[in-house]
Amino acid sequence: MKIRTLTLSAVAAMAIAPSAHAERGSSGHVNIIYWQAPSTLNPYLSGGTKELESSSLVLEPLARYNEKGAMVPWLAESVPTVENGGVSADLTTITWKLKPGLKWSDDTPVTSADVVFSWKYCTHPEGGCAQNEKYNDVKSVEALDDLTVKVTFGLSKPFPYGPFVGAQSPILQAKQFADCLGAKAPECTEANFGPIGTGPFTVKEFRPNDVISFEANQNYRDPAKPAFATATLKGGGEATAAARSVLETGEFDYAWNMQLAPDVIKAMEAKGKGKVVAAFGTLVERIMINFTNPAPGLGAERATAKHPHPILSDITVRKALSMAIDRKLLVEIGYGSAGRPTCNVLPAPEIYKSSANNACLVQDVEGAKKLLEETGWKAGADGVRAKDGMRLSLLYQTSTNAVRQDFQALIKQWWKEIGVEIELRNIDASVFFGSDPGSPDTFQKFFADVEMYANNFDGTDPEAYMSNWSCKQAPRPETQWQGNNMPRYCSKEYDGLVAEMATTGDLNERARLAKAMNDKLMQDYAILPLVDRGRVSAHSNTLGGVVLNTWDSELWNVADWFRKK
Amino acid sequence: MAELRQNPLVEIEGLKVHFPIHAGVFRRHIGDVKAVDDVSLQIYEGETLGLVGESGCGKSTVGRAVIRLYELTDGHIKIDGRDISHAGADELRPMRPAMQMIFQDPQASLNPRMTVSAIIGEPLDEHQSLSPSERIARIYELMDQVGLNRSFANRYPHEFSGGQRQRIGIARALALNPKFIVCDEPIAALDVSIQAQVVNLLEELQKKFGLTYLFISHDLSMIRHIADRVAVMYLGKIVELAPRDDLYADPAHPYTQALLSAVPEPDPEHEAKRQHIILEGDVPSPSNPPQGCNFCTRCPKAMDICHEIEPSFHAVGDGRYAACHLLEDR
Amino acid sequence: MFNYTIRRSLLAVPTLLLISLIIFLLLDLAPSDPTANLPLTIPPEVREKIRQSLGLGDPIYIRYILWCKQFFINEPLNILEHIFGWQIGGDRLRVLSWQTRSPVVDLIVQRLPQTLWVVGLSYVLGIVIAVPIGVISAYRQYSWFDQIGTFISMVGFSVPTFFTGVLLIVIFSVWLGWFPSIYDTTHQVTDWSSFLVQVKQMIMPVSVLALFNAAQISRYMRASMLDNLNQDYVRTARAKGVRERIVVLVHVLRNSLIPVTTVIALGVPQVFGGAIITEQVFKVNGLGQLLIIAIQGGDVPVVQTLTFIFALLIVLFNLIADVLYGVLDPRIRYD
Ligand SMILES: Nc1ncnc2c1ncn2[C@@H]1O[C@H](COP(=O)(O)OP(=O)(O)O)[C@@H](O)[C@H]1O
Ligand SMILES: [Mg+2]
């Protein structure tokens, strides 16, 4: 029921959105710049944001998320729910109905066979499909008739909107990719570089890691759209240059993801050529606490549950570390309008957002000192606190990145004030986030006391994300150091909440559980959230119709974009 | 004999060539190398004037300045009656054929990327307008004159021996029928066995074409063999100038005496009587010559006056000149 | 000379094979993961599957032999087919990029035009500027011309291109709006006005690089001219009464160009290497940018193939430099 109202309101919102022009192609040409260049247009072969978003001009899913995180039907007639009978009562099947009369850009009809094929394509065991997770637990996808598809799950799926929803799992044309299954996938260069789609644009030329030229899709379902006859998506360079090309020189109309210092953006915006737009999703910059002892002396048992952390097992230390941080200042220095302070690891969508932890928004150095003092952490001659001969000295690691190094320096200073000695370390992102099990420097191995990075989840449903901190998700030698529970946090109570959510279908009930999990993590100080990071993009003053969306592709509504007169 | 040839081809008067010394970040001018400092000479038509002196005393600079390969700091040079002291490049070029130079290092003085015929032919192209066949005929003729096999015409300098290379250099110098040739140590870089051949060639050509030579060398025996008159240089100045036989029989200047005392005598009787004068100390720097006589710091006969007043270059006998206070009232 | 060239070429074959092996081993040792740049939302199992599909599960010697086969046999056969329209047939797997899943050689071919245009032109321009500057600087050593030339080449040499590039963009794109700040690789020159557009978008990257190249080459030129100007053969030429212009431009310049030619020839592989930073600054997206993106993305086949091609070019141009030296300088003889 909830989903339906969300859907309806979204449809209503779209109806009143200003789409001023009535003729396809009347707005001419639009220039889009992505400072990371797309390397393929097949989103199944690359999980990168740049590939997902650039291909979203061409390939479309059955339903997608709007800017509020609500699901809207796209190629489907409506979003199936239990109420409308689209989702079975036992939550094991979902039945989608395609809009009638849909055409591929090559003028052939879109049928349920294409939907079934897309599932087969991504789940082929040798294909290395980057979006495999979207099809988790899917037992079968069948075409009931030309326009109807039934997805059956192997278990009861309270949130059955993984397959075919959002930019990550669009529909491929079965005819085009028929010979590209499994190991053959990478050999189909022509198809991967020029997929036939249903979206507002078709690929005219694709130059990998450089530029894409698009033309309006003459078979697009709305005869009045897109307003632009052609589009260019240029890739490469860095964020500053991309921002400059929109805000200062006006060569481009839209620039994606301006990860820039706040003052730089302000100065550029002052030129008056374009606007900066921000939107917030679930991306949170956070500090992870290591609950296990990373001392090198422990050999193979280093950073495993066998050895609890000698300092950080003490909750008062974790709490004091959190209290000493001035999150507002971090936002101001690092993100400006692209960030806001947060005390939750799950900051959105609105229904999942807890307000129980907001105390952390105010820095309290004195309180932190007092707390440590009271629990027996006494300052030594050098100002560093110690207890039972254990010095309060920590190794703080993160990836190499200017903003992160600024944060490290600031936080080191604050922690020094409360008597904690910090050693800083930064590791190249490709190593830090790499999953080479042989490397000691990955964020999963976590051979440090605290580490900082940002993470989020796809779509709007937090279930999988929140289950990251269950005991069994801890990276350890037995799992080849795979797993998402970096803190190696382990709580029976928390695992119980995870299990409960896995069997709960009601949305309100799910929201209550998610909030409880978030609060448990926050109040145990297992994760110290710092900044809720938004997406910041820029568009020219003459480009109309832009609605920034963090829940789906930023270019999700490119069909509605138009040139302002 | 000298009196008979009172027809000077080259007249040098008060020649000074100073090279500026720069130093520091802004390359300020902090002094000069006085490579040639007030030299006056005359070279008579058809004679060979030998110029001797230790290495670094300024012989080459004189030689190059005479044919205006250097700008003069001061003084005058007349060749064949024409003052070329300050002639510009365009004015000099038509006069180049008359005055030529043979260099010490036959390897370095030949452009490595030009063939023998190109080297010899270039001055012909520059100053005469010959047809291709005339040109090649002239090149062959010159090669014959210096004893080079015609078949070598298209070879490069590095393919020849030192003596042959010097022959190329001579052929090149002869190409335009010069009157006056500066031979700057033309044999110093050659094997002893070859030296005589080249010297004989030079003498032969002199006879044949009536050439006038300024023959520069540090080898007193060679000068004795070839020169008619000899000028002795020390630290940028001529200290003595005399007809050859007079100079060798009776050197007037203490420096000449010291130089000659070091030359072995062919006659064993004389050789036994010969007494060595060993000069003490080093040659002073030409950028900072001593006050008074340039030779005073090393002169075995130096007097007080030598340290104060520079001796003038004056006649000390029949066609003989020297710069020494000892000889002033002789 | 001919025998020498043949002998050197034959010797290059094992050298290059060894180089390719070393590159391969180094890349394998380097901690890089082609899935590292994917969003964290992609779970590790999926990443592992992606790596398997890229062939990372095979032992290293298999991967090396496969690459050798693909690069040394399959790709040349492909090129032959392409040029002569033959049908050699057979199912040949080409060297595939991990990021784009497309043949590396095609990527390189696609990048080559803009790199050759921008970097190559700047190299040619750099030489054209550098030679006269070097000649005049040396001929008028310590004159104001020489001092300014020295200063400019010092600036050109020491100020990084990412600085000069951005400076030019700010001045000419942002303030004056004369030139585009972003290079359009899809632009086609079809007529006069599109040619002007092409010239406009090339001006800034080309001049930044040309300044850098000219700075370097003019220094070599100057030094070499100075060496030669003091040689006796120059004095000989003057004594011959040769015009000064000919003395300098024929005698001195020709001899001075010998070492400079070598330096220029040895610099050519850099042209193909692209100008990583300048390409990045102006979004020229040539070979340099291809390499840097491949390195960042852990795209080993692209890095391997590109580095190997650079190695090949370096070996080739070393040989060319040596042969040129022999051709230009009659004193050098190889046999
Ligand atoms: N081009 C020059 N610049 C500066 N100093 C020079 C130059 N040529 C010669 N000299 C200096 O002038 C002095 C005389 O040199 P040079 O005439 O070559 O002597 P010599 O030929 O007698 O050996 C030496 O001290 C030499 O260093
Ligand atoms: Mg000399």
Image (cartoon, rainbow, N blue to C red):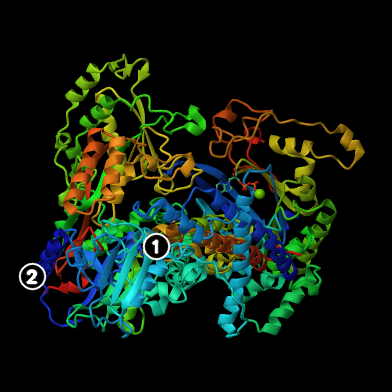
Mark 2 is on which residue type?
Answer: Ile
Q: Is there any visible trace of residue A41 in the rendered image?
A: no
What's the distance in space between the residues labelled 1 and 2, CA to CA?
35 Å
The residue lying at 20 percent from left, 77 percent from top is: A226
Q: Is residue B260 left or right of residue C266?
A: right
Q: Position of residue B95 (x, y in %)?
A: 58, 68
Q: Is residue A495 left or right of residue B313?
A: left
**Is there a contact, CB below 8 Å, between mark 1 and mark 2?**
no
Above or below, A122 relative to B238: below
The residue that disc 1 covers is A46
The location of residue C58, given as percent across then percent down, is 58, 56
Q: List the single residue furthest toward the right.
A: B268
Secondary structure found at label 2: helix
- Mark 1 or mark 2: which comes first in sequence? 2
Of C61 and A522, the residue lying toward us: A522
Between residue B79 and residue A225, name the one nearer to us: A225
Q: Which residue is mark 2?
A: A16
**Quadrant that contains the C terminus of chain A:** bottom left
